Amino acid sequence: MKVKKSFVLYHDFRNWFSLLTDEELGRLIRAIFDYEMNKELPENLNEKEQIAFFMVRDILDRDREKYERVCNRNKENARVRWEKMKKYGIEIPAEERERYE
């Protein structure tokens, strides 16, 4: 599966983040990026930062699972479409195959 190039920060997070100082928020944002990009759990967060991180992490995980389900569904739909195209002798464009492989 291709690596996601983005993730969502929801407006609801602002309420949680407002309880943090700018320094704490900076550490939290770095931890969120490290987790989303490399699945690294933070080791240097204080208690408030950890609480906010784990609340955000749960939502990131949920969103990633949904993204993967959609990708898998799209991949399966493309496979079915390709099988139909092959059946009728229609060639599948290389760029389309690359998107779903």
Image (cartoon, rainbow, N blue to C red):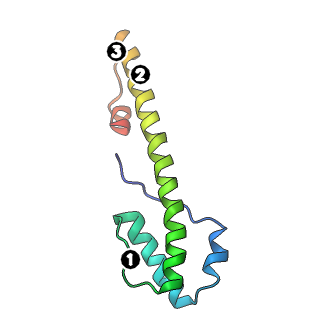
Closer-to-camera residue (75/65): 65
Measured as percent of width and height from the top left, residue 42 is found at 38, 77
**Quarter of the figure with the C terminus:** top left
Camera-nearest label, 1 or 3: 1
Q: CA distance from mark 2 to mark 3?
A: 10 Å
> In the image, which is nearer the foreground, mark 1 or mark 2?
1
Rendered location of residue 54, percent (x, y): 50, 70
SS class, disc 2: helix
What's the residue at 46%, 49% (across, down)? 65
In this rendering, the label closer to the viewer, 2 or 3: 2
Inspect this view and state whether residue 11 appears.
yes
Q: In which quarter of the view is residue 40 placed? A: bottom left
Q: Is mark 2 in CB contact (under 8 Å) with mark 3?
A: no
Compare marks 2 and 3 and give the one earlier in the sequence.
Answer: 2
Percent of width and height locating residue 47: 49, 85
Mark 3, Cα crowd under 10 Å, few <14 / some 14-19 / many 20+, is few
Looking at the image, is 40 positioned above or below residue 24? Answer: above
- Residue 25 circle label: none
Q: Amino acid at mark 3?
A: Lys
Q: Disc 2 marks which amino acid?
A: Val
Residue 32 place in picture, x, y as percent: 46, 71
Residue located beneath label 2 in the image: 80
Q: Earlier in the sequence, mark 1 or mark 2?
A: 1
Whether 18 is drawn above or below 71: the answer is: below
Mark 1 to mark 3 CA distance (whole Å): 49 Å
Disc 1 designates what residue? 42
Crowd band around label 1 with a 10 angstrom C-alpha radius: few (<14), some (14–19), many (20+):
some
Q: Secondary structure at mark 3?
A: helix
**Residue 86: mark in rendering:** 3
Q: Nearer the viewer, residue 6 or 46?
A: 46
